Image: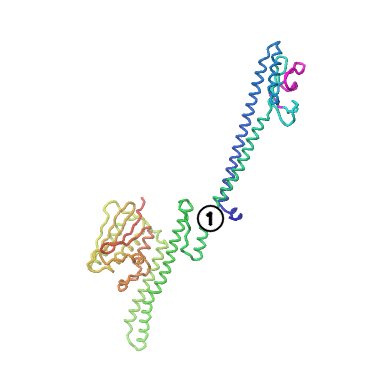
Amino acid sequence: MRRFSLLRSTPFRLALIFAFLFVLAFVLSGAIVYRLMSANLADRLDESIKETYSVVAATYAESDLEDLISTVDSHSALSPKRKQLFSLTGPDGKHLAGNFTAADLPDGFSMFDAAVSGMPSGSEYRAYSGSVGANKLAVAFNLSETEELESIVLMSFGWGTLIITGLAVAGGALLASRVQRRLDGIAATMVDVSHGRLDARIPLIGNGDDIDRVSSQVNAALDRLSALVEGMKQVSANIAHDLKTPLNRLQMILEAASERTASGQDVTDDLAEALAEGHQINETFEALLRIAQIEAGARKARFIDLDVNGVIETIAEIYGDVAEDDGKSLSAKIFQGPECQIHGDWELLTQMSANLVENALRHCPPGTAIELSVTRQDDCILVKVSDNGPGIPPEERERVFQRLYRLDHSRTTPGDGLGLSLVRAIADLHGASISLEDNHPGLTVTVNFPRARS
């Protein structure tokens, strides 16, 4: 990844911010630990100095200075590198024992440079002095070991900070590059789609993370867009193909009427036939417009919670006599139990059911039994329209939902090939799925609605 791309990458910037906050927390916690450790070491050193002072001072007995001098000299001899200093001076400031002279040190704890003891300057001593009888005793410990330990701790924190910073930046760059590759894949897919490649899809890695979920939703939207565009192409082709015949027929009727008018013949029948053709063409366009409006979701504002049993009962009552007059039978099987509530539009659901029944009546021979039914399955409401007619071949069941598509054996019957297209549009608007299944014999159309949440 190029430098400017990496710096402009949102994941990398977030990784840097996280790394900065983590390093800052590490440094702050390290500073607190260092201060606590330093204070603890100073307290322990003071305790050691005070304890050593007490041990040496305890050897002094009144009028028995020799034991004290001997103890001071023996402790001094045990520290040849002068890590520990001892000094005993008399009342007149005269040096009595020890490996340095500290007659001018104040009582209590104090600090002094190593040069005072004859050592090279640069190191310091921590001393405690006090009176032992008429004499003055001083005990001092070199701070080099404490300073060395503190230096080791500081260097450890320094190296730790550098390592953590490096790992955080490197890890951030690695993670950012992986995320950026996926984002670049999304951007590339959108560019392909904008250039007309509607079959392009965002690649998924299958781990179910948030980017995968968003990518799946975008892919689903692209599937829907592709289907709509394909539907528009199919509609355009079907309009050009299926409406060409009635338009040509209308033109021939008008031309014949014009010729008869010129010869003085009656053209009433021709005009009536032309009016019927025009009416049929107008109905086709109105149906196409209605499907487009439904697919746009304009009717969702009219949705209410309603009982689908009432819709089916109404359809059965309206079309019962129609079916009987046509030599067929229509029955309804209503779900017995709690109300089957769905969230939808009563008028559209009525039209959907009517279209399914009319489709069965139109394409089934006399003697066909048609059944409407409502059932519940888990959280779904199933509306079924079944018949024992000729049915639809399996290979044609998806095509019949296309606008203006008609089976070959149905082209001799009235209709415009938009009934099932309107049924699917209404089902999609209600979040329902629709399927065509074999009824052995005949066809079963099942619309699966989600049950309304109370």
Task: Report the residue at 47% width, 55% height from top.
Answer: 204
* Residue found at the very far bottom of the displayed protein: 263
Task: Report the residue at 31% width, 81% height from top.
Answer: 269
Secondary structure of the residue carrying tag 1 is helix
- Asked if the magenta segment contains residue 96, the reply would be yes
The magenta stretch is: 87-111
Tell me the amino acid under the disc marked 1.
Arg
Measured along the vertical axis of the image, is residue 423 above or below residue 275? above
Residue 377 placement (x, y as % from top left): 31, 53
Residue 306 placement (x, y as % from top left): 33, 56
Q: Which residue is mark 1?
A: 181
Task: Give the quadrant of residue 93.
Answer: top right
Task: Report the residue at 64% width, 28% height from top.
Answer: 42
- Asked if the magenta segment contains residue 425, the reply would be no
Q: Is residue 121 left or right of residue 151?
A: right
Q: Nearer the viewer, residue 348 or 180?
A: 180
